[in-house]
Amino acid sequence: MKLDNEVTKNKFDDIDIKVDFLIELCQTLQIENSEMSSKIKELEADLAEKNETEELNSEQDVLIQSKIDGLLSKLDSFSDDLALEPQSNM
């Protein structure tokens, strides 16, 4: 009878050790999960900022291209006008 009690006690001790290990593991995983969630939020914020910057750059590119096209159009018009004028230096 005493042997059965000792075996049972040893099994409970083993279970207790394993439960403690699992609890520690769960706590470690919760901490890691929290850290990863924070990192994800940080990366999402960085990505949103990058996307906003790219959108602003794209808008600036469109504006610059529009101004370049306008200036080229003025130059074309000016050179066409010069070509149509009679040359008085001959």
Image (cartoon, rainbow, N blue to C red):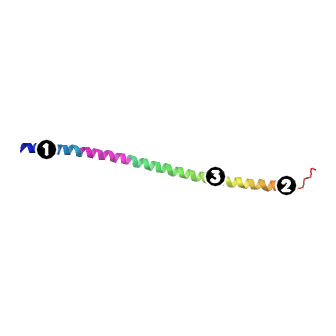
* Residue 87 pos. (x, y %): 90, 53
The residue identified by callout 3 is 61
* Residue 17 pos. (x, y %): 21, 43
Amino acid marked by disc 3? Asp
Residue sitting at the far left? 1
Query: Dot 2, crowdedness within 10 Å: few (<14), some or many (≥20)?
Result: few
Q: Is residue 61 left or right of residue 30?
A: right
Query: Dot 3, crowdedness within 10 Å: few (<14), some or many (≥20)?
Result: few
Name the element at disc 2.
Answer: helix
Question: Which one is closest to the eye, mark 3 or mark 1?
Answer: 1
Q: Is residue 86 above or below residue 18?
A: below
Q: Which mark is residue 83?
A: 2
**Residue 67 placement: quadrant:** bottom right
- Label 3 and label 1: CA atoms lie apart by 76 Å
Name the element at disc 3.
Answer: helix
Circles 3 and 1, Cβ within 8 Å, touching? The answer is no
Residue at 9 percent of width and 45 percent of height: 4
Amino acid marked by disc 1? Lys
Amino acid marked by disc 2? Ala
Query: Dot 1, crowdedness within 10 Å: few (<14), some or many (≥20)?
Result: few
81 within the magenta span: no
Q: Is residue 70 above or below residue 39?
A: below
* Residue 55 pos. (x, y %): 57, 53
Q: Earlier in the sequence, mark 2 or mark 3?
A: 3
Viewer-proximal residue, 9 or 49?
9
On-image quarter of the N terminus: top left
Circles 2 and 3, Cβ within 8 Å, touching? The answer is no
24 within the magenta span: yes
Magenta-colored span: 20-34
- Label 1 and label 2: CA atoms lie apart by 108 Å
